[in-house]
Amino acid sequence: MTTLRVKDELLLQVEKPARYIGNEVNSVKKDLSKIDIRFAFCFPDVYEVGMSHLGMQILYYYLNERKDTYCERVFAPWLDMEQKMREHNIPLFALESQEDIKNFDFLGFTLQYEMCYTNVINLIDLAGIPIWSKDRGEEDPIICAGGPCAYNPEPLAHFIDFFYIGEGEASLGKVLDIYKVHKQEGGSRRAFLEKLLDVEGIYVPCFYDVYYNEDGTINRFVPNHPKAKTKIKKQIVKDLDSTYYPTHAIMPWIQTVHDRVVLEVFRGCIRGCRFCHAGFVYRPVREKSKDVLMKQASLLLENTGYEEISLASLSTSDYSQLEKFSEELLEVCRESKVNISLPSLRIDEFSLDLMGKVQEIRKSSLTFAPEAGTQRLRNVINKGITEEDIISGSRRAFEGGWDRVKLYFMIGLPTETEQDIEGISDLANKIVDTFYAIPKENRAKTVKVVVSSSCFVPKPFTPFQWEPQNTYQEFMDKQYFLKSKIKRKQIQYNYHDAIVSALEGMIARGDRKVGDVLYAAWKAGCKFDGWSELFEFSKWEKAFKETGIDPAFYASRRRAYDEILPWDHISVGVTKDFLKREHERAMKEEVTPNCRQFCENCGAKRFRGGICYES
């Protein structure tokens, strides 16, 4: 049993002490005397959030497959524990060995959400490592970052030594191979970063300079090292059947956000919704075969004892072998009394039938994501779903015994009008009317339609990356307007304060100057900004004033096509010309067919794999 870094008397004074003790079933233990590379994998949020993240589980086991590497987990301590750690001079430590992170070779962050960026800064500081990359010395760990938010690395460019662009299984091993030799030869920190310039998918910010125009836009982005590439190309795994996938999962001591086995079905999405960052940066679609999925499902259930399995993808209904796979999985799960969680299903007869089989005893809520209230706006965003799809799907669901429907929408989409917002209320009313049109003997007694709205945030590498975001006041006015239109007791409307979304929009499309705001906000006390109970906008206002940065410049300003964007030096495969064409189609309310219907030559063919090369 590993000696705990935090003594029992301190653990007993904090909420959920099991967050900090490690030693879970299926966690990895290694002999440190036989290890060449120590890698601290950090999820910049609390334990129960990070432990629900599939990517962390994959890379944790993937890196630990290497005999020369020990990957350990790090999470953000909650406020009470951080206070105790600072009071008692306990630096940030890893769960497995309980040793200080500052003694590791690498500290790697996964960037899943912009509102975790102040946590990234806070964790570097808590580890006792200089916050600014330029201030780090030879004894400090190399700090790297990856994940979906790393596709615009610039807001964190001053704090991260290098960014990994793409899927970790593809090239991260090359980075460690280079480091192992470099460390044995006693090379310097800078020399190692220079060697990374030879690896595709690696972006080292210190080897690039940014120059600005008087109006604050970028004038040019220039490599300052002869080996630095002008374009950093995303790295992907072409064949998911042969790539690494863990057959174990760490069994946490406390309940996590998603407390179940997660089975990744495929990566990417064929749909091309124009607001969806993931739908573009994860192209092309790459599927696992049915037999591989069944083998992985059986091993994961056998090695964990979980009573629920979730199928993970951006759009599970689009899996080409879903019917046969679901039949086999249902049979296995019935025998072992395991529940199946089915997110991201389309509204069609097969999906409803499948959900009915999964929920034979008690039917929970049925979830649709129309995203927009009118067909016009659904065409603008290329949602690929009609009102008839929603109404007929609801009718079949109600006839099948469902009595609760959840509808997800976005407020503030490009070209949105008051009529589009009112259309959300109209659609909810039509669904209620559809329920009551069914004879009483063929439906449940009552119906509940839950309408939820989020605030649209323009993201890099989407057709809407040039669009202005609504201001905070515009978001709130629209939500209040929608609330006033919802009258029936069968309809419940959920919305949230838009201030975090407005800030997210500023960071998502930020440049290096936004890093100064992040630092100032952290100095003012900002952390866990994604947690509504901890978010304090007054501290961010102080940071904007201190740095002279206007958030509206990044969030609420329309960009021209010829403007140099902060992420233009990153290549995700999908071309800027394609995104322009999609933006123009959106403004004309034109729909683009999905990837299986017709190839629009988005640029993802350059990866020479996946759906682009299906026969």
Image (cartoon, rainbow, N blue to C red):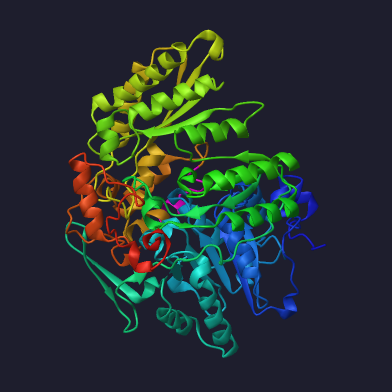
Toward the viewer: 234 or 465?
234
Residue plotted at (48% across, 27% down) = 406
Toward the viewer: 65 or 272?
272
Residue 522 on the magenta span = yes
Q: Which residues are magenta?
A: 519-530
Is residue 255 visible to the viewer in this orientation of the structure?
no
Q: Position of residue 546 (x, y in %)?
A: 34, 52
Q: Quadrant of residue 433?
A: top left
**Up/down of 15 relative to 117, above or below:** above
- Left/right placement of residue 414 relative to residue 506 reads left
Toward the viewer: 298 or 96?
298
Residue plotted at (54% across, 32% down) = 353
Residue plotted at (77% across, 45% down) = 12
**Up/down of 297 relative to 236, above or below:** above
Toward the viewer: 521 or 514?
514
Q: Position of residue 58 (x, y in %)?
A: 59, 60
Query: Please, which residue is most extreme toward the top here?
Result: 440
Is residue 584 visible to the viewer in this orientation of the structure?
yes
- Left/right placement of residue 123 relative to residue 238 reads right
